[in-house]
Image: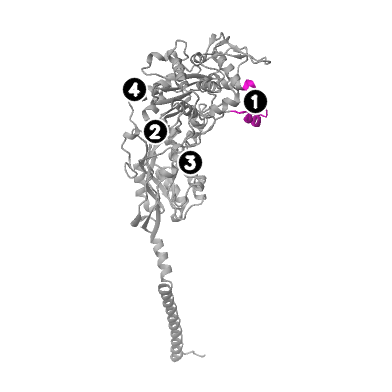
Amino acid sequence: MSFSLKDANIEKEIFVKRAALVSFFVFVMLLVLAGRMLFLQVSEYELYAGKSEKNRVQIEPVPPIRGLIFDRNGVLLAENLPSHSLTVVPERVENLDYSLKLVDQLVGLSERELENFEKRIDQWRRPYEAITLKHQLSEEEIARLMVNSNFLPGIQVEAELVRHYPQGKYFAHVLGYVGHMNERDKQRLDSAQYKATKRVGKIGIERYYEDQLHGQVGLQKVETNAQGRILNVLEREDPVPGKNLILNLDVNLQKVAMDAFEGRRGSLVAMDPKTGGVLAMVSTPSFDPNLFVNGISYKKYNALRDDLDTPLFDRATRGQYPPGSTMKPFLGLAFLEAGVTDWQETIADPGWYMLENDPRVYRDWKRSGHGEAIDLRDAIIQSCDTYYYEMAFRTGIDRLQPFLEKFGFGQRTSVDVQNELSALLPTRDWKRHHRGRSWYAGDTLNLALGQGFMLTTPLQLAQATSVYAAKGKWHRSKLVYSVDGNVLEETEKPEDVIITDPANWDRMNRAMEGVITHYLGTARNLESRLSYRVASKTGTAQVVGIDQDAEYDSEALEERQRDHALYMAFAPVEDPKIAVAVIVENGESAGRTAAPIAIKVMDEYLLNQPKRPESLGIVGASDGR
């Protein structure tokens, strides 16, 4: 039996060797660590100091305050109201799905809000750019979120200014509205100036004057914690606010005009013949533009889009209608300029007109005719179609079209109306190109009644009426009076309309006065309520054709198939201050529907002594915000 005894010396030697080896390894590791620390803190100091500073300090763009919009009397039409939104920085959210579920439990998220958020995440954006999840938080919702903020890293409540339109539907089409930026907006706008901007002008004045209203972006250097919340603002370069606009529009006229339609479809445009300023521009029915600022729901948008009365459609600038007999004063001057007639010549009106070698009968609106001796004055007062058939045939399209073009028909004439249509003033070449047929004499007769191929917009008819009221002097229609106190100057003005005998302006004006004052006038029912002189012309435009021998039967037609009612007027005749064009869709008798609307607007403007823009205190760029 053998025994193994421990050798203390050998064990000690082994321990010393192992300890030395471990010590050497530790020493080497300390040298490596020290070297690494030296490398990081000396050689790479600037690199990592910058990264550390970047994690702690962020450069953020600061959105400018959007400019305000006022009417001609200083009434606020577009303002900025404080609101709170819930925003998310996805890069700072550890578990996005969990965080969204928690937010949904706290404040409730709609399907549309979640869809918009997911769509925005998929789009290109700057790193660490906040995405809005929910708008217009209530005080109770804000409190819930703040209490639970520790469980929601990367999600915070932000205060912002949101566009609001106090007058709502009254200025929806003309002002337009702002809405969330989309990809098309980003492509057309300066990305550097819109880094922090969420909403831009979509239509109307808000779109046309976007560059003036937006302002210039600012910058701020902020200190943040690990969750990305701002602890301190280190430096700040303030943004430049957008410029304020003062319009030529009058809020009182706008309301009187829209209310006067009493729910009927149509449009009214009123202008100042001395300046071209648009005093009122109404398209009815209208809508509430505030619905679009933070994103309208599918349900509400579909209801507006599918409404048979098309409230989203701007009839004033994009509605194209046959002008009907409102063209007769312009055509009458054209006949005189062409020398085919004068104020003394008369013709017989049996109630119809026929061209040689043409079996078609061109009917007068009055089947029994207007008498054996109708002159130009009578033709204006009684709206005699037969007289205009004869004189239009004598004149021909090649002389009528150039003369009408001088008043702006068939052209875009406004200074600052977004998406204005030029409508249509037909020519021989136009018909040949678009219809593949020659121009016939019957086409000229249709043009003589403002029918056939010819179309005009309410804005275009008001522009022509304004030029006529100023006896041919041109001032292009414009919505905005001044930008930050700087009055907009008129540029690129069309040539004035010059006629051979200037006395014909006054002669035609007296004939147009007779539309109201003469016992046979087509708007004679208005005379008793007027305290000033009005020159005007009524008109109707067919919506559906009727057979040659058939009579127009209103009761047999559906409401939307009845004639449109039109009216153009200016007053006072001796010194015109307002020119108006009105259309009431399917309104039939202009004297009973369209004309009273125009008179209400002129009463408001002429009898209530409205202020003029030059008497206003102009609001500066930094005021009133």
Q: Earlier in the sequence, mark 4 or mark 2?
A: 2
Task: Locate residue 344, reporting x and y percent.
Answer: 51, 13
The amino acid beneath tag 2 is Asn
Q: Which of labels 3 and 2 is toward the front? A: 2
Of residues 339 and 253, the one nearer the viewer is 339
Residue for badge 2: 248
What is the magenta range? 426-443
Q: Secondary structure at mark 3?
A: helix
Q: Secondary structure at mark 4?
A: helix
Categorize mark 4 by other alpha carbons within 10 Å: few (<14), some (14-19), many (20+).
Answer: few
Q: Earlier in the sequence, mark 4 or mark 3?
A: 3
Q: Is residue 352 left or right of residue 604?
A: right
Task: Locate residue 523, reporting x and y percent.
Answer: 45, 15
Residue for badge 1: 439
Residue for badge 4: 607
Categorize mark 1 by other alpha carbons within 10 Å: few (<14), some (14-19), many (20+).
Answer: some
Of residues 119 and 146, the one nearer the viewer is 119
**Do the numbered discs 3 and 1 sit on residues whose CB atoms are within 8 Å?**
no
Q: Secondary structure at mark 2?
A: loop
Q: CA distance from mark 4 to mark 3?
A: 50 Å
Task: Locate residue 77, reporting x and y percent.
Answer: 37, 35
Main structural element of the magenta stretch: helix, strand or loop? helix
Instruction: Specify the quadrant that holds the C terminus.
Output: top left
Instruction: Please check the rendered image and state whether residue 150 is part of the magenta-colored stretch, yes or no.
Output: no
Residue for badge 3: 112
Q: CA distance from mark 4 to mark 2?
A: 18 Å
